[in-house]
Amino acid sequence: MRKLLVILGMLTCMAGLCACGKEEAAHPLVDEAGMIESAEYMIQQMNGIVSQGSDMIEQYSADPVIYAGLTGLQSAMEDIGTFNGTDGGEISYNDDEVIVRVNILGSDHNAVVELIFDDSITTCMSIATNVTYSLGENMTKAALNTVLGMGTVFVVLIFISLIISCFGVFNKIGDKKQKEEKPAAGAAADPIVEQIAQKEELAGDAELVAVIAAAVAAYEGSASTDGFVVRSIRKSNKSKWQNV
């Protein structure tokens, strides 16, 4: 761990000294070749640590920048394959950053390790490893991402359509139950309706009821109609000849 920290410190100090030596330069770094060489050596040391496994990497967990750089390189090694050394690099400048990129040679894929320093070149803010893929591989990944994205959308739409279609089934079931309940309620109400109809029929034929009651009382030889109750009057379907 100390060795890697010393290398990172040397790299930072070298960049700082180059910047102090040429204050009027267009860029703060002058000895770019020396800084790239130091960065290559640092990456080789990082590869040595990664090759020893996760237990060795965990020893650097106290430094978030180095730890992130080691774990990133470990993940990238699955695509890089065998580490075959470094192959130079380049330095670029932003308004508030200095970026050092070092090329890695691998048996399966090459990669680029990117070290980002602040504008004062005194602090390394991040170390990241980016695997270099071919155009065909990038197109394949893009196509797979597109298919997965569209497939997810279609699956969700199908699920929503199934839910909406279930609403129609539930409505049909509810209508069927209502239809089954209506006849039962009607059947229960029929006797009541019939009694009301009979009362209305008798109320409308009050004079006829009185005449019939008097005729029955006379036939029975009774002086009054108190003992007779006419509950309903129905029309006979028999002809006059049949009644004779």
Image (cartoon, helix red, strand yellow):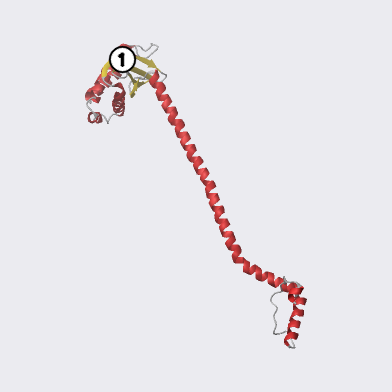
Residue under the point 41% across and 27% down = 144
Where does the N terminus fall, quadrant-wise?
top left
The quarter of the displayed image where residue 214 is located: bottom right
Number of numbered labels in the structure image: 1
Question: Relative to residue 149, is residue 82 depicted above or below?
Answer: above
Q: Mark 1 belongs to which amino acid? A: Ile
Above or below 34: residue 213: below
Q: How far from the left and from the top, in percent, is residue 170?
A: 52, 49
Q: Residue at x 25, y 22 (%)?
A: 47
In the image: residue 74, left or right of residue 193: left
Q: Considering the image in quadrants, where does the C terminus appear?
A: bottom right
Q: Position of residue 233 (x, y in %)?
A: 71, 74
In the image, 15 versus 212, the foreground residue is 212
- The residue that disc 1 covers is 36
Left or right, 153 with respect to 197, comes to: left
Percent across and percent down for residue 220 are 72, 86
Please tell me which residue lies in front, 114 or 138: 138
